Amino acid sequence: MSENKGFFKKLNDVFNALKNKDLYKRLFVNPLTYVTGAVLLALFNIVTFAATGKGWGVSGVLPYWSAWILKPIGDITTWANLSQATVDAGFWNNGVSIRNLGIILGALLAVLLASQFKIKKIKNWKQASGAMVGGLVMGYGAGVALGCNIGALFSGIASLSLAGWVFALFLFLGAYVGSKLLVKVFM
């Protein structure tokens, strides 16, 4: 047991030494530039396409998450647009699910490493209800568009799809209307 304490103390010492370095601040504290972020996203899309033969997507697998959660308690064979083979394969055999889990855990790790994790108090229920309505509308939009801003927009435009550009037009229109509603109604 004391060996573990020694290991974690050394790990903590290394972490604290790294925290004082400029590299740590550049990677975890200071935000990336837009150009750096765009280049990284493009590289992730290229690697994803090269490794899987499919464009980068996030939201297309979410109905399967519901199916995997509800499978033990109900009949999901009648759900439209779900591949029974994918449902039977399960969460851990689905590359998009693993990638989504990696995005969630990576974002959490980045926030923790930057010492920026905070649980914020809800200012008022008007803002909370606006956030919930906005999330539901975005989820519905991702379902209708057969993809979110990653699959329908980013991968769509990268594959020279007209649908990606149409998605972009309505994304900007929706962002404009949503920001106006946010200021006038929910603030």
Image (spheres, rainbow, N blue to C red):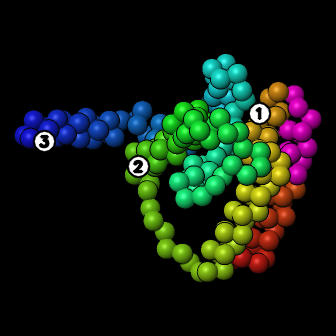
- Graded by Cα atoms within 10 Å as few (under 14), some (14 to 19) or many (20 or more), the crowding at tag 1 reads many
Q: Residue 144: where, in percent of width, then height?
A: 83, 52
Q: Residue 152: where, in percent of width, then height?
A: 79, 40
- The amino acid beneath tag 1 is Ser
Please tell me which residue lies in front, 36 or 124: 124
Q: Which mark is residue 5?
A: 3
Please tell me which residue lies in front, 43 or 93: 93
Apparent side of residue 107 relative to residue 144 in the rendered image (left or right): left
- Graded by Cα atoms within 10 Å as few (under 14), some (14 to 19) or many (20 or more), the crowding at tag 2 reads few
Please state the extent of the stretch shown in magenta in the rendering.
160-171
Q: Is residue 170 magenta?
A: yes
- The amino acid beneath tag 3 is Lys
Rendered view: 78 above or below 33 = below
- The residue that label 2 is drawn on is 112
> Gap in Å between the C-alphas at discs 3 and 1?
46 Å
Q: Are marks 1 and 2 in contact (CB under 8 Å)?
A: no
- The residue that label 1 is drawn on is 155
Which circle's residue, 3 or 1, is located before the other in the chain?
3
Apparent side of residue 22 relative to residue 181 in the rendered image (left or right): left
